[in-house]
Image (cartoon, rainbow, N blue to C red):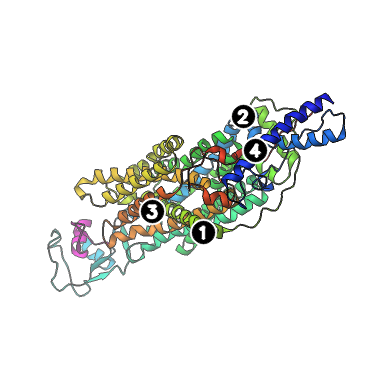
Amino acid sequence: MGQCRSLLTTDLLVVTVGHFYEVLARSVYPTGQPSPLTAEGVKEEQRSSFSLRETSILCDGPSCCDVAMKVTERHLNMADFDEVLKHIGELGPYQIRLCFLVYLPALPCCMHMFSMVFIGATPLHHCATPELDAALSEQNASLAERMNVTIPWELADGVWQHSSCTRYNMSEYSWDLTNATAGPTFNMAANLSTTECDAGWEYDRSQFHTSVSVEFDLVCSRKWLNNLAQSILMVGVLCGAVVFGDLSDRYGRKWTFFLALSLQILFGVANAFTHSYATFVVLRFLVGACAYPVFMIAFVIGQEIVGPSKRALAGSVIELAFGAAIMVLAGLAYAIREWTFLQLAITLPSAVFILSWWLVPESPRWLVAKGRLEEAMEIIQLMAKRNGKALPSDIRLDRTQRSNRGQHSALDLVRTPNMMRKSIVIFSNWFAVTILYYGLSLSTADLAGDDYVNFFLVGVVEVPGYLSSFVVIDRLGRRVPHMLYMVVGGVACVAAAFIPKHLAPLTTTLVMIGKFGAAGAFNIIYIWTGELYPTVVRNVGVGVSVLWSRCGGIASPFIALLKDVWGPFPLIILGAPACLAGALALVLPETLGLPLPETMEEAEHFGGRRRTNEQYMPESDAESHFEMLETQ
C-alpha cells in the first residue's frame, strides 16, 4: 500500500502541474481554439501508434491501482521510435552500412537526369551537298574549300561562321574552285539564293562520334525535339514520384525500391538500342519514371532509419549524389564518345546493386505503421546488435488504436489567406530554384572552353553548396540563408548574361557561382518546406511543392532555345525568378529552434508572432511512434 501511495502522490503532482499548463495554454489561445497543451489539442492521431506500458504495479487496493495505472500510462506516453534509436544508436555502423547500400544505387539514377547533355549533344554541322561533292572532289577540294563554295557565311554574335542550316541553291550553276578561298565577306553570287538542308547534314565527329542529335538529325528546325526529350524525361520523373511514392507507402520501401531499380535498368538498356525518335522519347519517359524514385525512396529510407539529430546529415549526404553523378558522368562521357555505349555505361552498373536485396531490410518505421510488430522488433534487435548497443529487455511493442485523423487535402494549403500566402511563396521558390539548377546543369555546352571540364565543374561546385548550407542553417536559420543562396545564384546568372565574349572565363565563373547558389538553396528548401507545413498536411504540402519543382524541370530545357531570340535571354530567365523568389522567401517564418506545427490552427499562427519552444508541444510527443514499457 505504501508503494502505491508513493506512486500515486508523485503522479498526482504531475497531474496538478499538467493542469496548470492547460490553464496557461487556454489563456494564450482563444476560446474554442485547441491548444497543443490542452487535452483537446493533443489529438489521438498525434499519440503513439505503438505503446510500451508498465504492466505490473504493486498495489494493495483496486481503486489505488486504477488511478495509479491511469496516471502512469499518461506520464509514460512520451518516448517514440526516435527514443528507441537513442538507445541503440542514432547513426551507428548498421545505419551507415544501410545508407551506403541504398544511397549508392542513386548515383547512376541521378546520372540519367543529366545524360542528355552528352547523349543528345549537338556537334558542329552544315548542310550536306551530295550533288557537288563528286565534282569538287575531282578538283581535290578540301572541306574548307568545299564549304566556301557551298555554304553561306552568317554573322552570329559578332562572329562570322558558316551557316548550319542553309546552303547555296546551285542547281543552275557549274562551279570550280576559283573563289574557294574567299572570306566571309565575299558574295558568291549577287543573285544566288539559299535553301534549307534538303539532303541532310554533315557532322563534325571529332568530339562526339555519335549522339541522339546526329542519329535522328535533331538540328535546325528539329532541334527543339532534343529539348523535348529532356522535358519528357522530367514528365516521367513527375509521374514516377507519384506512382512509386504511393506504392512505397502501400507495399513497403524495400520492395518498391528494388522494383524501381530493376525497371530503370530494363528501360535504360532498351533506350540504348532505339532506332526511332518516338521510341527513344517513350523510353526516356519510362527511364525518368523509374530512375528518380530510386533516389526518392533511398532518401526516405535514410530519414527513417537514423535518429532525429542525424536526419539533416543523412539528407545532405544523399543530396550530394547529384553533384557526384555530374562529376562521374563527365568522366564517362569523356571516355565514351558513342551515345549508345554511354547510355549502357550509365545503366548497367545498377545491376550489381540488385544483389543487395538480401542485405537491405524493410524500414522498421513502415513495419510499425503497418502493425507488423514482430518483424520490426527483429530489425530493432539486429540494429542494436550491429551497433554494439544493448536493447533494454523491458521494451515491448503494443498496437494501439488511432482515432480518425479527419480529411485533409491540398485545398488546405490555400484555404486561408495566410496559408495561401505561404504556399504561393513556397511553390514559387521550388519552381525558381529548379529552373536555375537544371537550366545551368543542362546548358554547359554554351559556355566557352572544354565541354567535359565545364560539366565536371558544375558538379564540383555543388559540394560546397550543399555542405555550406548544411552548416549555416543550424546557426543562422533557414530564411536568410535561403534568400542569400537564391539571390546570389540569380544575380550571378543575370550578370553572366551581359559579359562580353572576350571575357568568357568570367562568364563561366559567374555560372558556377549561380550553380553553387542553386545547390545550397535546393538543400534548404527541402528541409524548410517540411517544417513550415503542419503534420496533418505535411506530406501533401511537400508533394505539391515537388510538383511545382518538376514543372520547373520540364520547362528548363526549352529556356535554352530563347538564345535564338536574344543571346542573354536564357541566363536572364534562369536568374531573375531566383532573385524574386528569394526575396519573397523573407515573408516566410523562421523555423530554427521551433517545434513543428501539428494542426492547421498551429500552422495558421506559426510565424505570426515569435513563440517560445514551451508554447508548442515538443515534436517528439506529437509524432511519436513508440512509448516505453517498463515491466517489474
Q: Which mark is residue 20?
A: 4
Q: Hey, which quadrant is residue 454 in on the image?
A: top left
Q: Which mark is residue 210?
A: 3
On the image, numbered disc 2 is attached to which residue?
89
x 56%, y 54%: residue? 540
Q: Which mark is residue 332?
A: none
Q: Secondary structure at mark 3?
A: loop
Instruction: State which tag comes first along the sequence, 2 or 3.
Output: 2
Instruction: State which tag comes first along the sequence, 1 or 3.
Output: 3
Tag 1: Cα neighbours inside 10 Å, few (<14), some, or many (≥20)?
A: some
Which circle, 2 or 3, is nearer the viewer?
2
The segment highlighted magenta reads 139-164
Q: Which mark is residue 414?
A: 1
Q: Hey, which quadrant is residue 453 in on the image?
A: top left
Amino acid at pointer 2: Gly
Q: Hey, which quadrant is residue 87 in on the image?
A: top right
Tag 2: Cα neighbours inside 10 Å, few (<14), some, or many (≥20)?
A: many
Q: Is residue 288 left or right of residue 82?
A: left
